[in-house]
Image: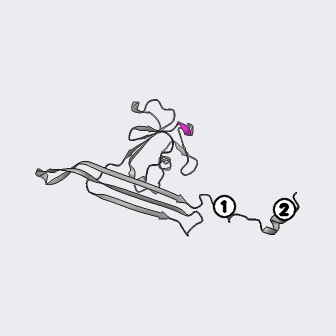
Amino acid sequence: KQIGIRNVNTLAAITPGVYQSDDGNSLSMRGGRTNATTYFIDGVKVRGVTTVPQKAIGQLTVITGGTPAEYGDMIGGIISITTASPSYKLAGGAELLTSQGLDPYGYNLIGLNLSGPILTKYIDSINYNKPILGFFIAGEGEFQKDSRPAFGGIPVLTPDALSDLQQNPL
């Protein structure tokens, strides 16, 4: 929760035996191919994109060797994500990150989460409402104005140069 990483793959890449060519890219575990990494979310095998909001991750386990029997026979490594549990009291949060006006990327991210009890049971002996049923909702949205801006801007032909090229092609 304290590390400044938002992507599951980038977070897993700080584990020994895990290689990632660039932030957010696929992982290679123990020298295996990038498609040999298997993802589980709450015990369910997931294929494709594994975008889980940062606030929704309760626990992240990276297994690079000695695969437990519960996961079966895997070639590469395993990333197991356990989502967060409901809180005992109503809690929530929102965050907004933006680089609008600071750089040419125009990065924007908004994250929301809400958690709490739905049904509680009062325990007389300790004067406490114990949650029996609860909820947890989290979401994230990201938008970039330009994900790969050109250094120094984009060169554009002047109308005179374009006209000259059209009249005198090489």
Hey, what amino acid is under mark 1? Ala
At 82% from the left edge and 66% from the top edge, which residue is drawn?
A: 161
- In the rendered image, residue 37, in percent from the top left (x then y), is placed at 51, 38
Q: Main secondary structure of the magenta part?
A: helix
Q: Please name which of the two marks, 2 or 1, marks the residue nearer to the observer.
A: 2
Residue 36 sits inside the magenta stretch: yes
The N terminus lies in quadrant: bottom left
Hey, what amino acid is under mark 2? Leu
For the residue labelled by badge 1, is the local secondary structure a helix, a strand or a loop?
loop
Residue under numbered circle 2: 165
Magenta stretch: give its range. 33-37
- In the rendered image, residue 148, in percent from the top left (x then y), is placed at 62, 58
Using residue 110 as the reference point, say whether residue 90 is left or right of it: left
At 11% from the left edge and 51% from the top edge, which residue is drawn?
A: 124
Residue at the left extreme of this rendering:
125
Q: Tell me the quarter of the picture where residue 95 sits.
A: bottom left
Residue under numbered circle 1: 150
Q: How far apart are marks 2 and 1 (CA)?
A: 24 Å
At 43% from the left edge and 58% from the top edge, which residue is drawn?
A: 111
- In the rendered image, residue 61, in percent from the top left (x then y), is placed at 41, 43
